[in-house]
Amino acid sequence: MKVISTLSTCAVITVIFLMMYAGVQQTYRSGANDPQIQIARDIARELREGETIEHIFPRDSFDISKSLSSFAVVYDSSSKPLRSSGFLNGTPPQLPPGVFDFVKSHGEDMVTWQPHRGVRMAMVLCFVQSPNVRFVAVGRSLREIEIRENNLVSMVLGGWLVCIGIIIMSALIQLKFKKQ
């Protein structure tokens, strides 16, 4: 009977730690979209109000695989990039076609995009009804979020191991005293 109680306690502790991890990890990941949501919606609004791409996008650009900065890309109705503040391998980011199909029918989407190993982006896409632009995509690197998530795994795993260790030690001590 004591073994079942110990196993049940271990199972409950495991569920609690998994829920803590999932809650914090989802907070990290969903928070990674916050700046992009604001930027994408602002750009989409400006385009709907008749602002030009040239006015919205400065000439400065950067390599998105090396920077933590947010970047924006506007696409035409055939999902081809018109202007981008960030580049990947010297070209504007080109997202998979299915993403644009979903955004066209739903208005907005938030995705994780991994164009190649070691480069992961939190992306927000908006559908726009303006003369030349149909889609606005804003993204930023998930590098720092992934570092936080790895630290979180270490903390949760360490806490879980300590708790399970205490439960097992307690059960062993009780078992030893019971035999005496």
Image (cartoon, rainbow, N blue to C red):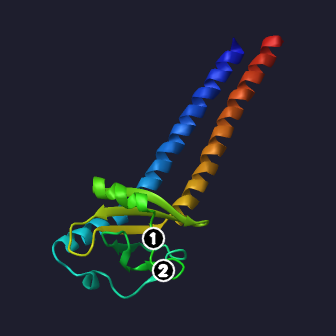
Position of residue 171 in the picture relative to residue 27 (left or right)? right
What amino acid does circle 1 point to? Gln
Q: Label 2 crowding class (10 Å Cα cut-off): few <14, some 14-19, many 20+?
A: few
| Residue 175 vertical placement versus 58 (above, below) | above
The residue lying at 68 percent from left, 33 percent from top is: 164
The residue identified by callout 1 is: 94
Decide: marks 1, 2 in contact (CB < 8 A)? yes
- Residue 88 position, x and y percent, is 51, 77
Q: Residue at the right extreme?
A: 180
Q: Can residue 32 be seen at all in this image of the molecule?
A: no
Q: Position of residue 104 (x, y in %)?
A: 30, 58
Amino acid on which the number 2 mark rests in the picture:
Thr
Q: Decide if residue 104 is on the left or right side of residue 158.
A: left
Q: Is residue 55 left or right of residue 61?
A: left
Please count the marks in the image. 2
Question: Would you identify the image quadrant in which residue 53 lies?
Answer: bottom left
Q: Can you say whether 89 is above or below 174 in the image?
A: below
Q: Residue at x 16, y 77 (%)?
A: 50
Going 51% across and 38% down the picture, which residue do you hit? 19
Classify the position of the N terminus by image quarter: top right
1 or 140: nearer the eye?
A: 140
Q: Is residue 23 above or below residue 179?
A: below
Specify the quadrant that holds the C terminus. Answer: top right
Give the crowd class for mark 1: few <14, some 14-19, many >=20 residues within 10 Å.
some
User: Tag 1's secondary structure?
Assistant: loop
Quadrant in which residue 117 is drawn? bottom right
Q: Is residue 45 above or below residue 62?
A: above
Label number found at residue 91: 2
Nearer to us in this view, 91 or 167: 91
